[in-house]
């Protein structure tokens, strides 16, 4: 989808040092993520980032915290526990 809008001339001049299309796209991505309407993956695709780490750096640079629920934390803890158990088993058998 292509979106077009008009800016008052004085605002366009004030922002002329920037790539206005990119700035608008980034603003949409930031607000979409901040309001939880966009996921990190959607922000990644929207802005053309290669990795989730680029998304995290972009969000941090703009003062936007990761949307990370307690359920996601619990799942990450469980996965980490499983990985430690696998590593310990391999170490004992080596």
Image (cartoon, helix red, strand yellow):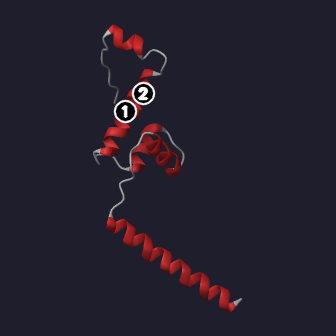
Labelled disc at residue 91: none
Report crowding for label 2: few under 14, some 14 to 19, many 20 or more residues within 10 A (C-alpha). few
Callout count: 2
Tag 2 and tag 1, C-beta contact below 8 Å? yes
Which quadrant is the C terminus positioned in?
bottom right
Point out the residue furthest to the top here.
9
Instruction: Say which residue label 2 marks.
Output: 23
x and y percentages locating residue 61 in the rendered image: 47, 41
Report crowding for label 1: few under 14, some 14 to 19, many 20 or more residues within 10 A (C-alpha). few
Secondary structure of the residue carrying numbered label 2? helix
As drawn, 85 above or below 39: below
Point out the residue furthest to the right here.
94
Instruction: Say which residue label 1 marks.
Output: 27
Q: Quadrant of residue 63?
A: top left
x and y percentages locating residue 85 in the rendered image: 54, 84
At a point 39% along the width and 68% down the height, the residue shown is 73
Q: Is residue 84 left or right of residue 78?
A: right
As drawn, 79 above or below 47: below
Which quadrant is the N terminus positioned in?
top left
Secondary structure of the residue carrying numbered label 1? helix
As drawn, 63 above or below 21: below
x and y percentages locating residue 90 in the rendered image: 64, 86
Point out the residue furthest to the bottom here.
93
At a point 47% along the width and 46% down the height, the residue shown is 55
At a point 34% along the width and 45% down the height, the residue shown is 33
Distance between the alpha carbons at the discs numbered 2 and 1:
6 Å
x and y percentages locating residue 81 in the rendered image: 49, 79
At a point 54% along the width and 78% down the height, the residue shown is 83
Point out the residue furthest to the front here.
63
As drawn, 58 above or below 88: above
Q: Which of these two is toward me, 5 or 18?
A: 18
């Amino acid at each position: 989808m292509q979106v077009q809008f008009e800016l008052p001339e004085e605002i366009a001049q004030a922002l002329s040092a920037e790539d206005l299309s990119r700035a608008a796209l980034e603003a949409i991505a930031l607000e979409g993520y901040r309001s939880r309407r966009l996921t990190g993956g959607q922000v990644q695709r929207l802005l053309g980032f290669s990795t989730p780490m680029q998304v995290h750096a972009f969000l941090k640079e703009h003062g936007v915290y990761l949307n990370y629920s307690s359920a996601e934390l619990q799942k990450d803890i469980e996965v980490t526990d499983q990985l430690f158990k696998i590593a310990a088993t391999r170490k004992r058998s080596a």
